[in-house]
């Protein structure tokens, strides 16, 4: 390593940065995103309204036959499956998409019962929905 070149490079870069360079980098970007390995599959979002909780899973190329859902507890949804490649390995030139077996545990915001979970597949998305158990305050000694 040429130390003289390294010194010149550092001097040059220091001329173009302000004293707040690193703090401004972290103001605009979450530092955790720099270490994100991007290997969680499938990605998901959780939504809720007054009556239901809905989880939307992103699972392109996954068929109903290749995925299994179960409750590992009443507050954890376990998803296992396989993403099969579209073409044989011998035809690959470049691949970025995930292929292979996967398993993911999703914490549920509220407890669920297996019999009340509804699963629908649509255009590479999977919707997992279940009713919320909202307790009526008036039944538990609320004022009337």
Image: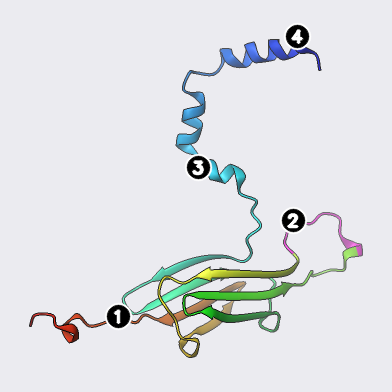
Relative to 92, does residue 138 appear above or below in the rendering?
Answer: below
Where disc 2 sits, the SS reads: loop
Q: Residues within 10 Å of mark 3 (few under 14, many from 20)?
A: few
The one nearer the camera, 74 or 14, is 74
Q: Which stretch did the figure color magenta?
A: 90-98
Please provide percent x and percent y for residue 5: 75, 12
Q: CA distance from mark 3 to mark 1?
A: 35 Å
Splitting the image into 4 quarters, where does residue 10 fall?
top right
The one nearer the camera, 17 or 133, is 133
Please provide percent x and percent y for residue 25: 51, 32
Q: Please tell me whether the stretch drawn in magenta is mainly helix, strand or loop.
A: loop
Residue 30 tag number: 3
Q: CA distance from mark 4 to mark 1?
A: 69 Å
The residue that mark 2 highlights is: 96
Answer with left or right where residue 84 lies relative to residue 141.
Answer: right
Q: Residue furthest bottom?
A: 115
Foreground label between 3 and 2? 3
Relative to 98, does residue 38 appear above or below in the rendering?
Answer: above
The residue that mark 4 highlights is: 4
The residue that mark 1 highlights is: 134
């Amino acid at each position: 390593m040429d130390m003289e070149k390294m010194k010149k490079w550092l001097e040059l870069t220091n001329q173009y940065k302000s004293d707040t360079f690193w703090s401004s980098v972290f103001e605009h970007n979450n530092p955790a995103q720099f270490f994100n390995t991007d290997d969680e599959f499938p990605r998901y979002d959780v939504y809720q309204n007054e009556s239901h909780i809905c989880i939307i899973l992103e699972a392109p190329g996954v068929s109903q036959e290749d995925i299994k859902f179960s409750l590992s507890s009443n507050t954890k949804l376990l998803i296992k499956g396989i993403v099969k490649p579209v073409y044989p390995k011998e035809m690959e030139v470049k691949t970025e998409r995930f292929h292979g077996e996967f398993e993911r545990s999703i914490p549920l915001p509220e407890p669920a019962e297996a019999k009340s979970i509804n699963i629908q597949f649509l255009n590479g998305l999977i919707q997992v929905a279940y009713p919320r158990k909202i307790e009526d305050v008036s039944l538990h000694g609320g004022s009337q």
